[in-house]
Image (spheres, rainbow, N blue to C red):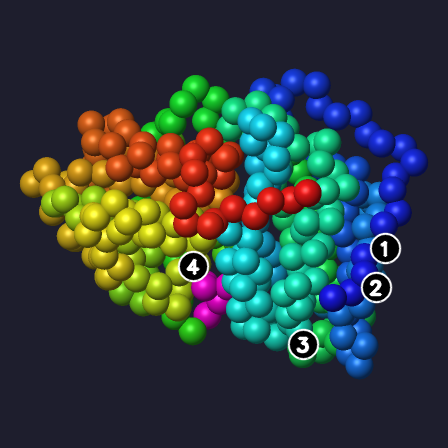
């Protein structure tokens, strides 16, 4: 493991006074982590520096061909003053898979973990403490070669920035309305849908804007070939409870393998529920909504943890689920996952990692 050089800021910023106004991704802490890759040298020079802008050549490859990856995770303050990460080894392993797909040299896993822990420890005072708040962690890698030929870059920057974020649900869990998109697609099998890459989000914006115009918070994607099978939501995986069984689309190469998705499956199975990973067609959903067997629907992702879906719209079909409210499994998953993340519930599965 490489030693991280730490340079502390001489001018600490003022911390946000009102944690209820934090929002998401708006403000950044005093420090950032940065590490470089050059061919022949590997990943080197890990350091923590005051948060600052970076200078890049206009010809840097990331700007032209989007050779970029990212991760998203959170650190939580417990009531007894500890700081916990939630299943960080899963994010680190997923980052390695994303890097592999995008021809980016992966950061050694122990250096990645050490970078996370050290940076969070340096900026510990920035972790908000109100219920529902957390410190959002954004690791990312960009290609930095000054070159316009299409080829994997020979140099990269790995950075981690931190953003205190507010409670996702200010007044308790709140069901969302979701638009099932049958024109635009996000990803196809063989593409980069299962990689956490900025490029996937660039491809998603058009449909997101369309859905928002119709009054829907997020878009639910169908498969890129037949536009018939359910894939996932903007930045969340999707779950249904149909006829007593929990169902989520199987990971098929174009769906992002969410850590929260895995956690929902693990918990439902531990609770003795049937939890299936399989293909789910939109016709099956419409039929289940009509005959009343579509009992619940929720999205899963780091930002919202669990996001109950009250309404699904497919063409002219408007499906109201759980009476437009919050189903019991959604609520129990939310309470359990956030309970473990914040140390209120015992961590029976060994999912949390303390940052000292
Ligand atoms: C990050 C992400 C998710 C959720 O993954 P988590 O690890 O649960 O946060 C789902 N879909 C997409 C497209 C994502 O980028």
Q: Is residue 9 left or right of residue 320?
A: right
Mark closer to the observer (1, 3): 1
Q: Quadrant of residue 223?
A: bottom left
Q: In the rendered image, which quarter contains the N terminus?
A: bottom right
Residue 152, which numbered label?
Answer: 3
Q: In whole angstroms, how far apart are the C-alphas of marks 1 and 3?
A: 28 Å
Q: In whole angstroms, how far apart are the C-alphas of marks 4 and 3?
A: 24 Å
* Badge 4 or badge 2: first in the primary sequence: 2
119 up-or-down from 18: above or below: below
Q: Is residue 244 left or right of residue 355?
A: left
Crowding at label 2, few (<14), some or many (≥20) Cα neighbours within 10 Å? some
Crowding at label 3, few (<14), some or many (≥20) Cα neighbours within 10 Å? some
Q: Nearer the viewer, residue 120 or 229?
A: 120
| Helix, strand or loop under label 1 | strand
Q: Residue furthest right?
A: 10
* Badge 1 or badge 4: first in the primary sequence: 1
* Badge 1 or badge 3: first in the primary sequence: 1
Q: Which residue is mark 4?
A: 257
Q: In the rendered structure, which segment of residues is drawn in magenta?
A: 191-198
């Amino acid at each position: 493991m490489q030693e991280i050089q730490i340079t502390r800021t001489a001018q600490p910023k003022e911390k946000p006074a009102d944690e209820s106004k934090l929002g998401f991704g708006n403000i950044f802490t005093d420090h950032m982590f940065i590490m470089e890759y050059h061919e022949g040298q590997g990943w080197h020079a890990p350091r923590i520096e005051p948060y600052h802008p970076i200078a890049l050549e206009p010809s840097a490859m990331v700007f032209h061909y989007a050779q970029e990856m990212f991760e998203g995770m959170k650190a939580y303050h417990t009531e007894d003053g500890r700081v916990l990460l939630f299943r960080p080894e899963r994010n680190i392993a997923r980052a390695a898979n994303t890097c592999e797909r995008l021809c980016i040299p992966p950061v050694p896993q122990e250096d990645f973990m050490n970078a996370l822990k050290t940076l969070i420890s340096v900026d510990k005072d920035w972790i908000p403490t109100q219920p529902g708040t957390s410190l959002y962690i954004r690791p990312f890698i960009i290609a930095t070669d000054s070159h316009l030929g299409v080829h994997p870059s020979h140099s990269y920057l790995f950075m981690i920035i931190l953003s205190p974020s507010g409670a996702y649900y200010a007044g308790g869990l709140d069901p969302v309305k979701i638009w099932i998109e049958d024109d635009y697609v996000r990803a196809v099998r063989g593409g980069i849908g299962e990689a956490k890459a900025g490029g996937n989000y660039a491809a998603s914006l058009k449909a997101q804007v369309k859905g928002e115009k119709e009054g829907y918070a997020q878009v639910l994607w169908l498969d890129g070939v037949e536009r018939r099978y359910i894939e996932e939501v903007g930045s969340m995986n999707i779950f249904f409870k149909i006829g007593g069984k929990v169902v989520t689309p199987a990971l098929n190469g174009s769906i992002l393998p969410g850590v929260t998705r895995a956690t929902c499956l693990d918990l439902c199975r531990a609770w003795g529920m049937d939890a299936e990973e399989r293909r789910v067609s939109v016709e099956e959903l419409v039929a289940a909504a009509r005959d009343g067997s579509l009992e619940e629907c929720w999205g899963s992702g780091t930002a919202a943890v669990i996001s109950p879906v009250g309404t699904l719209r497919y063409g002219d079909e408007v499906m109201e689920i759980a009476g437009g409210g919050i189903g019991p499994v959604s609520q129990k998953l939310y309470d359990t996952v956030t309970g473990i993340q914040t140390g209120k519930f015992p961590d029976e599965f060994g999912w949390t990692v303390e940052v000292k």
